Amino acid sequence: MENKANGNTYGSFYHELLTRKMNGEELKLDELTREELKTLYAEVSTTDIAKLFGVSFEKVKYRLRKWHILYSDILKERASKDTLSS
């Protein structure tokens, strides 16, 4: 995908993708980078990602497993950022 997952100043990455879909753009899960998928997974559920891209829950889970994206790692990163900003 063209847009960067990080540094989005207009709201969440999910909201940006949803807006693009509502404006007629066809979104393809296979075009997401690992970082974009990780950012999206940190914002919304696997089910929401599947609905956004019009794919099965299992396809999203497969991609997450393939790229070793774990929600526990996302939580650890958040905790680390919170600790550093305190």
Image (cartoon, helix red, strand yellow):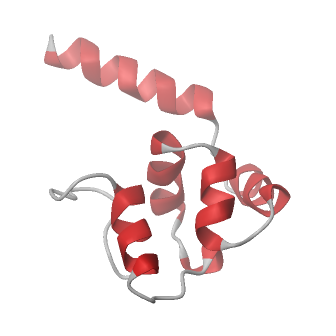
34 or 51: nearer the eye?
Answer: 51
32 or 23: nearer the eye?
Answer: 23
Q: Is residue 59 left or right of residue 11?
A: right
Residue 65 on image: x %, y %: 76, 50
Q: Relative to 17, is 37 above or below? A: above
Residue positioned 22% across, 59% down in the render: 8
Q: Is residue 33 left or right of residue 5?
A: right
Residue positioned 54% across, 88% down in the render: 26
Q: Quadrant of residue 79?
A: top left
- The C terminus lies in which quarter of the figure? top left
Q: Quadrant of residue 15?
A: bottom left
Q: Is residue 20 visible?
A: yes
Q: Quadrant of residue 22?
A: bottom left
Which residue is the extreme one toward the right? 58
Q: Relative to 57, is 69 above or below? A: above
Q: Relative to 32, is 42 above or below? A: above
Residue 63 on image: x %, y %: 72, 60
74 or 22: nearer the eye?
Answer: 22
Which residue is the extreme one toward the front? 22
Q: Is residue 28 left or right of residue 56?
A: left
Q: Relative to 22, is 68 above or below? A: above
Residue positioned 15% across, 56% down in the render: 9
